[in-house]
Image (tube, grey):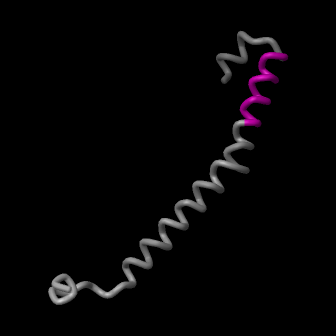
Amino acid sequence: MRHAAADSKPESLMKRLEEEIKFSSYLVSEKCPKELESKKQSLYFLQKVVAEPAMGQSDLNE
């Protein structure tokens, strides 16, 4: 960023920073919460599977 700033005009640097802020805001407000909810749901189902008793041979035969 410093190297790019040395050769840039203030306007282009401000534009780049604004784009970075928009991207970071998107990550925080949309992408990360969706991913977190997906991970929580996966964890819920995995915990549900782990809580089930192990199947024995008789269960498999049925």
Q: Is residue 36 above or below residue 7?
A: below
Q: Front-most of 61 and 51? A: 61
Q: Report the side of 31 relative to 22 (left or right).
A: left
Q: Is residue 9 above or below residue 34?
A: above
Number of numbered callouts drawn = 0
As for residue 27 lying within the magenta part, the answer is no
Q: Residue furthest front?
A: 62
The residue range painted magenta reads 11-22
Q: Residue at x 19, y 82 (%)?
A: 60
Residue 39, percent from left and from top? 52, 61
Residue 50, percent from left and from top? 37, 79
Q: Quadrant of the C terminus?
A: bottom left
Residue 9, percent from left and from top? 80, 12
Q: Is residue 56 above or below residue 43?
A: below
Q: Front-most of 48 and 32? A: 48
Prevalent SS, magenta region = helix
Q: Quadrant of the N terminus?
A: top right
Q: Quadrant of residue 22?
A: top right
Q: Front-most of 5 and 53? A: 53
Q: Residue at x 53, y 67 (%)?
A: 41
Q: Residue furthest right?
A: 11
Q: Residue at x 72, y 32 (%)?
A: 20
Q: Residue at x 17, y 89 (%)?
A: 58
As for residue 13 lying within the magenta part, the answer is yes
Q: Report the side of 58 relative to 53 (left or right).
A: left
Q: Is residue 60 above or below residue 4?
A: below
